[in-house]
Amino acid sequence: MVINEKSKEKFIIRRMEERDLPEVLAIERVSFPNPWHESTFRGEIQNKSISFPWVMVREPGDQVVGYIIFWKVGEEVQVNNIAIHPDFRRRGLGESLLREVISWVKKEGAQFITLEVRPSNLAARALYQKLGFRTIGLRRFYYSNPVEDALVMILDLGS
């Protein structure tokens, strides 16, 4: 359970389920100019061998306020998608969600986490840097709508 220090609200983090998809898709659509399709999320839910789709749910009740999808393959982790509902941003929930992932994958033997981020996404970049990620590369023309490069960032968990 995560307790938001500012609002004292309680949140749980659990594996994403099919019943979460309407709320997850709504968050996805307002968060990204090129949102994932429902079938992509379904595929992540079903791919239990390497995919870990997690949701952050407000308690009491079952309102999905955010989610993260990451892959763990051996010692490597790739964050593929993370978003918080606009009504719940600026409360530290994205940081809490990412810290939970970092803690869990460390216990599971991961050595590093990678992700891509738009250079223009200053809020996300600041969060990743705060958590110790550093930029190691650039993927040219990675994003569309609008076209933009991606910064490749890594967090070394071995230190």
Image (cartoon, grey):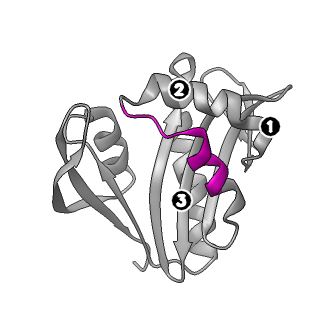
Foreground residue among 133 and 21 = 21
The mark that comes first in sequence, 3 or 1, is: 1
- Position of 76 compared to 41: left or right? left
Q: Amino acid at mark 1?
A: Arg
The verdict on residue 37 being magenta is: yes
- Is 9 above or below relative to 13? above
CA distance for labels 2 and 1: 25 Å
Task: Say which element carries label 2.
Answer: loop
Q: Position of residue 136 (x, y in %)?
A: 20, 65
Q: Residues within 10 Å of mark 1 (few under 14, many from 20)?
A: few
Q: At 56% across and 27% down in the image, what residue appears?
A: 27
Residue 45 found in image quarter: bottom right
- Is 16 above or below relative to 61? below
Q: Position of residue 77 (x, y in %)?
A: 48, 69
Q: At 67% across and 73% down in the image, what residue appears?
A: 49
Instruction: Report the residue marked by disc 1.
Output: 19
Q: Which mark is residue 70?
A: 3
- Position of 136 compared to 103: left or right? left
Q: Amino acid at mark 2?
A: Arg
Q: Quadrant of the N terminus?
A: top right
Q: Position of residue 88 (x, y in %)?
A: 56, 22
The mark that comes first in sequence, 2 or 1, is: 1
The mark that comes first in sequence, 2 or 3, is: 3
Instruction: Report the residue marked by disc 2.
Output: 91
Q: Position of residue 137 (x, y in %)?
A: 17, 63
Q: At 55% across and 16% down in the image, what residue appears?
A: 87
Residue 108 found in image quarter: bottom right
Q: Nearer the viewer, mark 3 or mark 1?
A: 1
Task: Say which element carries label 1.
Answer: helix
For the record, the magenta segment spans: 34-44
CA distance for labels 3 and 1: 19 Å
Q: Main secondary structure of the magenta part?
A: helix
